[in-house]
Amino acid sequence: MSEDLSGRIRTALDRPVEREVAAFAQRLAEAAAPEALAVLFYGSNLRTGSLEGVLDFYVLTRGPQVEKIWPRVSYHEWTFEGTDLRAKVATMPLETFRAAAAGELLDTTIWARFVQPSGLVWARDEDAAEAAAKAVGSAAQTAARLAIALGPEAGTPEDYWRALFRATYAAEFRVEKAGRENSILEANRAHFDGLLPLALIAQGIGFARGGPEGTLRPALPAAARARTLRWWKRRQRLGKPYNVARLVKASTTFEGAARYAAWKIERHTGIPVALTPWRERHPVLAAPGVLWGLWRARRAAAKRTPSA
């Protein structure tokens, strides 16, 4: 990774966060000790500074990858100095994160997610911080390389990022509104400003500048473009099955899944869900009963509401 991109990534990762977020990251790291190496914070709460909703963290650990399908996902609730906080936490080895960010694995989620803004809110030491930063820099390089392979022969950086996000969202088993790629760029304009040229320079890909709105013409040889597109086609074919496998795994291994689902239901419907020990242990088996109770509660509420 070139010094320019390296400096850009470290500056971005060192962004200030709310003290509640930093305290939560510290708590997660202590819970994962002594394996914890770094904690990354990402998502809309990073951009807005809001503590509402669910905070998103990645806890990166030392050691080899044990699980075939990763990361391990858990839900946490914590009250810090009178503020109720909620977090969804993905845990995985730093080495697996690095390999995924570099495009060495079939996964598409890591480099597509971490080319977007994130913050390094806790690190065990400077070596761990540097390793995490290099991995995030690799995500930017992987994403940039695919962006210019998918994008036009010449275009603005936004044209290339737009092509990238449109393709990755389509490849994953996700429901996103049309134009989601535009909202990502609009919400994170400062983050993406100038990032594409730095990510191309870092991997020796030349380009010409010129024309309106900072148009770029990447000098990607035809053989390199074809190689990148073959690399992408394989991941594109496996994207949805791989994400379905992750969802199936999460349905049985998501720590705190019942509490997370109960909070989501109450937030969106206003109807509280009673959590029993059995529901905590068997969230999938409990789901039909919860949905039946929700339907009955909404129907009863509708009957109590006088018609206009």
Image: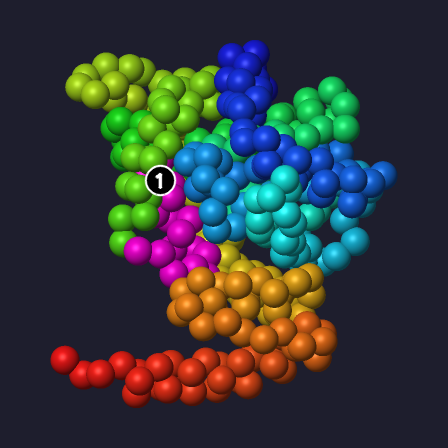
Toward the viewer: 45 or 111? 45
Residue in the picture at 45% in, 72% down: 271
Segment tinted magenta in the rendering? 161-177
Report the side of 272 relative to 189 (left or right).
right
Determine whether 302 is above or below 56 in the image.
below
Residue in the picture at 78% in, 40% down: 30
Q: How is the image coloured?
A: rainbow
Q: Position of residue 307 (x, y in %)?
A: 18, 83
Q: Secondary structure at mark 1?
A: helix
Residue in the picture at 76% in, 49% down: 65
Toward the viewer: 45 or 196? 45
Can you see residue 240?
A: yes
- Which residue appears farthest toward the top when viewing the image? 3
On the image, numbered disc 1 is attached to which residue? 184
Q: Main secondary structure of the magenta part?
A: helix
The stretch drawn in magenta includes residue 166: yes
Q: Position of residue 105 (x, y in %)?
A: 62, 46
Toward the viewer: 278 or 228? 278
Q: Position of residue 190 (x, y in %)?
A: 36, 24
The amino acid marked with disc number 1 is Ile
Determine whether 221 is above or below 46 in the image.
above
Q: Position of residue 40 (x, y in %)?
A: 61, 36
Toward the viewer: 17 or 275? 275
